[in-house]
Amino acid sequence: MNQALDQIVAMLKRFEGCCLTAYQDVVGVWTIGYGETLGVKQGDVWTQEQADNTLRQRAGQFMLATLLRCARLHTEPEDRTIACTSLAYNIGVGAFGASSVSRKTMRGDYTGAANAFLLWNKAAGRAVRGLTLRRKMERLRYMGSAA
């Protein structure tokens, strides 16, 4: 479990980037560190240590929540949990739980679930290049090709 968490943190760092000063993301949500939005407000400033520690803590919370919403992941290869946690971190746990990625995983439709990652590439209704690249990498990870 610790090794999976390390890999999730590394994946999130790769996708999220780090900003130590609060900023508004593409849909206007105040964000800091590696995509943290919980309790963030204009003017917040973090240290790198604070950003790293918060990411690890939140990644662990998201991994557990992802496993709760898609119980079949408990018996699947770790790469599926890593990819699904990355998706959940980005779109929210509730959206992940209701997603076709989660539903198809629960049914054992792994190809369908992998392809469903690609549907989550929009912000404010528009396809975003960075999200498209992220979803392709998550899809590869889900299918067992470490990204």
Image: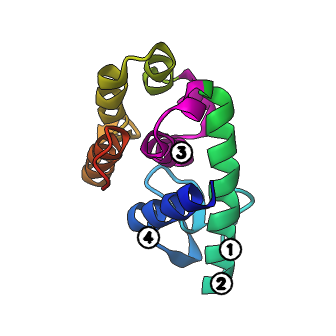
Q: What residue type is labelled 1?
A: Asn
Hey, which quadrant is residue 39 in on the image? Answer: bottom right
Cα separation, mark 2 vs mark 4, equals 14 Å
In percent of the image, x 32 and y 53: which residue is there?
146
Magenta part of the chain: 72-98
**Residue 111 counted in the magenta span:** no
Q: Which mark is residue 85?
A: 3
Circle 1 sits on which residue? 53
Query: Residue 138: where, in percent of width, then height?
Result: 35, 46
- Color theme of the render: rainbow
Q: Alpha-carbon neighbours of circle 2 within 10 Å: few (<14), some, or many (≥20)?
A: few
Circle 2 sits on which residue? 49
- Pick the residue in front: 75 or 82: 75
Q: Do the residues labelled 2 and 1 touch (CB within 8 Å)?
A: yes
Cα separation, mark 3 vs mark 1, equals 17 Å
Q: Can residue 23 be seen in this view?
A: yes
Circle 4 sits on which residue? 17
Above or below, 19 relative to 47: above
In percent of the image, x 44 and y 44: which residue is there?
83
Q: Are marks 4 and 1 in contact (CB under 8 Å)?
A: no
> Which element type, helix, strand or loop, lies under badge 2?
helix
